Image: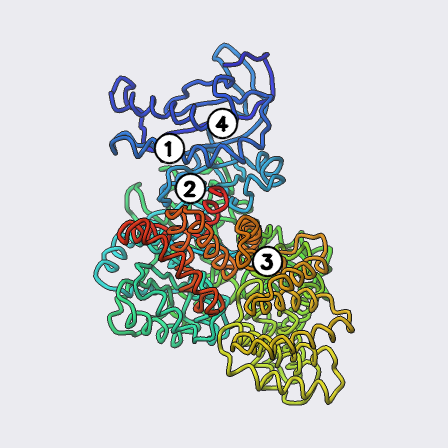
Amino acid sequence: MDAFPPAVHRTIFVADVEGFGARRRTNPVQVAIREGLYRVLREAFDAAGIRWEDCYREDRGDGVLVLIFPGVPKHLVAARLPDQLSAALRRHNRGCTEVVRIRLRVAVHAGEVHHDTHGVVGTAINLAFRLLDAAAVKSALAASPGVIALIASEWFFEEVIRHDPASNPATYQRVWVAVKETHTTAWIRLPDQPSPENEVVMTGERRSLPVELTSFVGRTAEVAEIKRLLSESRLVTLTGPGGVGKTRIALRVAAELRNSYPDGVYLVELSGLRDPQLLTYTLAAAMGLPGQTARPAIDVLADYLKTKRVLLVLDTCEHIIDPCATLVDVLLRTTTAVDVLITSRQPLDSTGERILSIRPMPVPQGGEPFGRYDALTLFADRAAVVLPEFAVTEENWAVVAAVCRRLDGIPLAIELAVVRLRVFSLDQMVSLLDDRFRLLTRNRRTAPHRQQTLRTAIDWSYELCTPEEQLLWARLAVFPADFDVPAARQICANGKLAARQILEHLADLVDKSVVVRVETSVGTRYRLLDTIREYGRERMATLGEEVELRRQHCEFYSAMAQRFDAEWLGSAQVAWTQLLNAERPNLRMAMDFCFSEPGEAMAGLTMATTLWGYWLCSARLSEGRYWFDRGLGLLPEPTPIRARALWLTGWFAIAQGEHPAGEPLFAESRAIAEQIGDDSAVAYAIQYLGGLAMFQGDSARSLVLYEDALTRLRTLGDRPGLVIITFQLGLCLVLNGHLDRALAACDESLLINGDNDERWCRGWALYIKGLAFWLVGDYSDSVEMIMASLRMKHELGDIQGIAHCLDVLGWGAAQQARHERAAWLLGAAQPLWQKIGVPLFGAELLQNYHRAAEKQAQEVLGQDTYAAIFHAGTKLTVDQSVKLATEDE
């Protein structure tokens, strides 16, 4: 334990055992818990490279204060300690009875501390303990099946975590913290938040449920009733007006039931989906099912879910209610253990559907004595963020009750109104609301009462905005989901709203709870809640700006697609894929505008084909084909864009195993290209005719076609085309036994690609080299190539590449007589093949090696042992599989 001078800057770590209580420490259970806590902390600190003995430590109430030695880099605390704590806690909990198991809330901060007569003190320590006591971190741990919730101060996150990739900044979510007089923001992470079984975490996308950014208030009866209904029925729909809290309640139920669904709980957000034909693709993507099979997405979903125990949360279905009903009906009829929780303003009207109407929070009706009501608790909780000193007391209880009663206990209306406490007193708020409702009843007598209430609350929020804020609110409604500042500046700046003003007004709308700020893997983004967006669309239409704003939106995202096309084959590939994953609702809306607006179809097909690299990197071949087909159906004329869309459609079709569809597409593309003199399209049509011949087993024809196309692309100097055709030629040569030439072709692909961090093409070139080395008997070089490819494919989120690599590593393990490793590697690949459709390109040569490795491992281990280890492999997440595969090697 270190000694230090009266004032010094230290990294501050505080922890509290959830539910420890304030009982006497002589209680044997309490003693055992505290002793266990210190063992866990010592083990975790030492494993993280932070000497426990060098840290200052003391008990603080039910918690522990640790001041970390100043020689320890702060990034170690963020990068290593959370995961080591999680691992140590899990080991501890496995070895003890339930009564002494530990779940921890942890806070980290840094600042000046000093000694006084009471010991170690300082405002930085006070803040750390207030973070530890924040409702947000308590809610996060309560909703998590894990053993630890970490909250970092704003300073620690911005100065340490955000700049250190090893600290996983993308896994944190920003929260508001209001404890006593402190009003600040902080960042929460759940280090051991488990992914659903067999989940694929695609780059830039979240598969786990979002962390609750504010405390969850009340709704105990509703949560319990939904759980009961789900125990009796496989389809439960939460209905109710906008703003009543359907989504929040559904997410709380999903979080609490997570352990009841061993194959995963999946949130599918549908508010930004406007094209119902994309519904099945959206659900498949949410579950990590790649669009790399030509089978209808509904068939892929049904087959994959046939034996799974899964909860699907379909959020905001009312605008596509009939397609949702059809999809849910198919899934429930073709599976046995899939449950579905719906939020919608109207029921699906499906067989077996149980409906729970979510009503506003209870409010006092007048004359009741001081007491607890959920609506008032919500008001007080959110008011403490606006005015940290605010509390509901016997003196102001009646006025708060009057406000909540005037707002009918509708949560969104209450949250919007609370923001006004910065400007108005409670008494003023009651008076102003009364005025608003008198005006409303004169002007809108026929609307349902609760609809009137919410509309009034939103109207009031709108009218209290400045004219510039009102205009920005209306224009932001053009975004179907979240957006970033550059998009808002480019699209929404016009006329009375200058680009330089956008950020200022956006911040004001966040401050007024109109816009929500969200932290994502691609940085800070913003969104309007669904009800607020609907209101904004009405205002946008009233202003007569809808078509022009959608055109500007389309032009912005078309330009983004063009920048992607110019840069994706390089070091920015992973970052671009992450960004476009986040922007997918906006890309979809832009293309839909083009294909719906007269005269814009060419721009839409251009955009869809410009995104070809994204459809490949993100495993969304089916969605790419959907957009190609929409454009081709509208543009029959022989143009360069049609020729390009035809050979891309054919390529994606044969990559999905739909070989008969390819040849006529390539033939038409080539005919158009020759007619209009498009040498590039001619070369690509010939190239993918070669790919078709390869997959059909016509080796001689495939080599002739590939070499013809290669010569043409060399003449054109087409770098992306050359990078791809050379590794594809390498695969063709591997399957035809020309292994030295295959290695040379892959080396040429790597050489043309250059010295950069590109992942998709480079990963395939290394994988094919690994196959070639395997076939010549150079197993060590084969494993080295496959391992490098696996790391690249995992970084990109290419599950087809990951499956190929895990499978071939299984062959290598069997050849090295590491049969247990072979069993779990082949098991880990199995659920990915189920998602992809066709294993190992459908190549008989490669499948024979898979079967040989499987047979060898079964013979050595025995059928039962092999089956048990194989099954354990199928239960690993992709992250776990890759980590084990690369570390164990």
Q: Amino acid at mark 3?
A: Lys
Inter-mark Cα distance, 3 to 4: 48 Å
Compared with 314, 805 (above or below) is above
Compared with 414, 650 (above or below) is below
Q: Which badge, 3 or 4, comes first in the chain's sequence?
A: 4
Compared with 311, 184 (above or below) is above
Element class at badge 2: loop
What label does residue 13 carry, if any?
A: 4
* Quadrant in the rendering for residue 9: top right
| Mark 1 surroundings within 10 Å by alpha-carbon count, few (fewer than 14), some (14 through 19), many (20 or more) | many
Inter-mark Cα distance, 2 to 4: 18 Å
Look at mark 3 in the image and give the residue it sits on: 769
Compared with 180, 876 (above or below) is below
Q: Amino acid at mark 1?
A: Leu
Q: Amino acid at mark 4?
A: Phe
What label does residue 192 carry, if any?
A: 2
Residue closer to the observer: 90 or 658 = 658
